Structure formats: C-alpha cells, structure tokens
Image: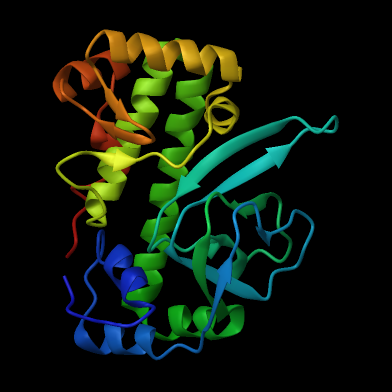
Amino acid sequence: MSSTSGPLSLLVRKLETHAVLDAADRSALLALPYTCRTYEASSYLVREGDAPAQCAVLLTGFAYRQKLTGSGMRQIVSMHIPGEALDFQHLFLDVADHNVQTLTRADVATIPRTALRELAQSRASIGNAIFINTLVEASIFREWILNVGRRDARSRLAHFLCEFAIRLDMQGLTGPEGYELPMSQEQLGDALGLTAVHVNRTIKSLESDGLISRNRRRISFPRWDALRELADFSTRYLHLSQQRG
C-alpha cells in the first residue's frame, strides 16, 4: 500500500486493493489535473443521457447509482464510499445510462475524462488496475441482482449490511463500534426492492434477534458470524484475494 497523500490518495489506495502500482504509477495518478467541489445530499453527479466530460472520485461522504422506470419508480443499483471512482465506464462510453447522486454531503474530485483515459492507455499497470476495478464492480452488480431477486427480506438486508461493513473496512472507514449507515428506510427500500414499512419491520427483527445493534444511525454487529450466516454472505464476489502480481 502506498504512503501517498492529497485529494487523490484515496483513489490510489482503492486501485491498489486489487493491483500493484509502483511509485511512478502513484505519482502519475496524483499528478492528474482535478477540481474539488462540495455537493449537498441528493446532488446529481451524473445524469442519464448526459455525455460526461469528467470522472468523479468520491473523497468524503457517500453516493449511489440509480435507475428510474418510466413511471418514476427508483431502483438504487449500487452504493459508493470514499475513494471510489463513480464513473470509470465513461472513460470509454460516451453517454451515461444511469444517474449518480450524492447520498450525503460529499466532497468530490473531478478529473478530466481525456486526462485519465490517456494515463490508463499510456501506463499499462494503471489501465490494468482500472480494468480490474471495473470487473469487481460488475461482480458486485451480479450479487445485488441475486440479493434482490432471490433472498428474503431478512437475508437481503443482512447481506447489504455485511457488504457495506466489509467495503468500508477495506478503506479503513470502520471503527470498533461498527459504522454509521447514512440511508433512510425509504432509500434502503429502493436498494433492496422493499417498502419502507417492510424495511422498518426487518430492521427491528434483526435487532430483536441480537444480530445488529443500533444507536441512532450507527450499526454494530454483536453476532457477526450469525448475521453472515443469515445473509448467505461470502466475500468471494468482492475478490479480496485477487492476485496483485
């Protein structure tokens, strides 16, 4: 892991999760041009139908991808945490096919699309790291489809909570008392294919069974192994053991 600092250091750390970057690679990434901006919750970072000219990197806060039906019903299709690039796909695809919004107040660094694409093409190790990152995102999408389509409500929510814990921990963003879940019950419902009322009942059910503990929005896991078993949760789809050589 690198000892880099600066606004893009979280991106370097994220890319190094699955790939080896040398000192020159890290320096090249940190030297990319970027602009930092703070967005309020619910701000659009990508709009469906747009032709993005920037690649956004989440520095603080949380964001999510979502799709809308013709009648305006929302499905949240992924969650994003600090350090993650929000639209690597737009390095090579010219039109956005979904929306990306901030879930909370967030600091975002935007990198010109052309600059990042040229770097990925000129330095094979960086291009490889971006490619692997995109493949892991696709693996997570597949797991989300399975979760919404085939697991019951308790397992569905438990799986979401387990994944969020592991991904935050990978970026060093959890503590001994768990993590703060920055989502309303309506937003959880849109991610899990449940109504807000059903989410509320399911949270209370997990809590009454001692599988989770809540203090306002902070979630902790007094029976982590039991929660994982209920969730049918395996980290395989996160590819934490991806060869870095």
In the rendered structure, the answer to whether residue 223 lies left or right of residue 167 reads: left
Establish if 164 lies above or below 130: above
Res. 226 in view? yes
In the rendered structure, the answer to whether residue 70 lies left or right of residue 40 reads: right
- Looking at the picture, tell me which residue is in the foreground, 85 or 132: 85
Establish if 203 lies above or below 107: above
- Looking at the picture, tell me which residue is in the foreground, 23 or 193: 193
**In x, y percent, where is residue 26?**
28, 83
Name the residue located 61 percent from the left edge and 65 percent from the top edge: 90
**In x, y percent, where is residue 241?**
18, 48
Q: Residue furthest front?
A: 216
Quarter containing the C terminus = bottom left
Quarter containing the N terminus = bottom left
Name the residue located 43 percent from the left edge and 86 percent from the top edge: 122
Picture quarter containing residue 217?
Answer: top left
Count every numbered label the image shows and give the total. Answer: 0
**In x, y percent, where is residue 34?**
51, 84
Res. 194 in view? no
Name the residue located 47 percent from the left edge and 31 percent from the top edge: 144
**In x, y percent, where is residue 91?**
58, 70
Name the residue located 38 percent from the left edge and 77 percent from the top edge: 8
In the rendered structure, the answer to whether residue 218 lies left or right of residue 145 reads: left
Q: Residue furthest right?
A: 71
Query: How is the structure coloured here?
Result: rainbow
In the rendered structure, the answer to whether residue 52 lies left or right of residue 197 reads: right
Establish if 90 lies above or below 136: below
- Looking at the picture, tell me which residue is in the foreground, 232 or 130: 232
